[in-house]
Amino acid sequence: MPYYDNNYDDSSLNTEDRLLEAKKQLQRADKNFHRLKRTKVDERTTLKNDDGKTYYMKVNVDVYGNGQVGTRIRNAVTGMRYPYVVGSKDQDLLYSVAICTGENGLKEAIHLFYDSPEQYENHMFQNVDMDIKTNWHNNFNTYMKASY
């Protein structure tokens, strides 16, 4: 009869599993990492049933929030830090949103920074009004021309 050991050690994991576990440990230790639940259209079910209804599903969205004024800004999707500082004029180069829903038992807003409104739309399964996107892109282009 074979013996199955449920107590895995690091040597029993392949390289991909080790990297995934290391990433999870880093995320757990990061106080600005949050996992939010969002609703998105379940295109597979909607197309499969073809009954005129739109079906939705819940998904987890991992986000990297930002710290206090004076800390370096992080990309909400990747967690990469920019050379820009929270509260500086340079933060206008990025599209920012605040999650103020009280999710995850938080009493403060989670401030998120994205490269563009389109990156926010793709990450959070939301639609941004075209006027807002146009205005942001115009302001971004004006800021870039003025700084170079």
Image (spheres, helix red, strand yellow):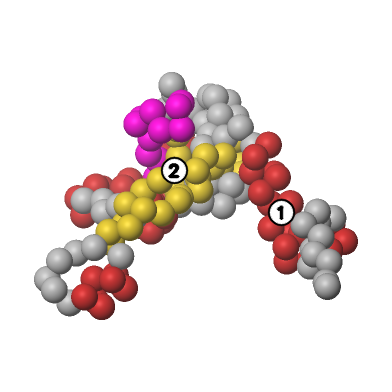
Q: Which quadrant is the N terminus positioned in?
A: bottom right
* Res 128 label: none
Q: Is residue 41 above or below residue 75?
A: below
Span colored in magenta: 94-106
Q: How many marks?
A: 2
Return the residue at label 2. 36
Q: Is residue 95 magenta?
A: yes
Q: Position of residue 40 (x, y in %)?
A: 31, 57
Q: Quadrant of residue 6?
A: bottom right
For label 1, count other residues whose C-alpha is less than 10 Å away and answer few (under 14), some (14-19) or many (20+).
Answer: some
**Given the current orientation, which residue lies at the most extreme front position?**
1
Q: Residue at x 83, y 66 (%)?
A: 3
Q: Looking at the picture, tell me which residue is in the foreground, 142 or 24.
A: 24
Q: Amino acid at mark 1?
A: Glu
Q: Position of residue 52 (x, y in %)?
A: 12, 71
Q: Position of residue 15 (x, y in %)?
A: 78, 66
Disc 2 on helix, strand or loop? strand
Q: Position of residue 120 (x, y in %)?
A: 38, 51
Return the residue at label 1. 21
Query: Are the residues at dot 2 and dot 1 in contact (C-beta closer than 8 Å)?
Result: no
Q: Amino acid at mark 2?
A: Leu
Marks 2 and 1, the one that precedes in the sequence: 1
Q: Is residue 77 magenta?
A: no
Q: Looking at the picture, tell me which residue is in the foreground, 42 or 101.
A: 42
The answer to whether 23 appears left or right of 92 in the picture is right
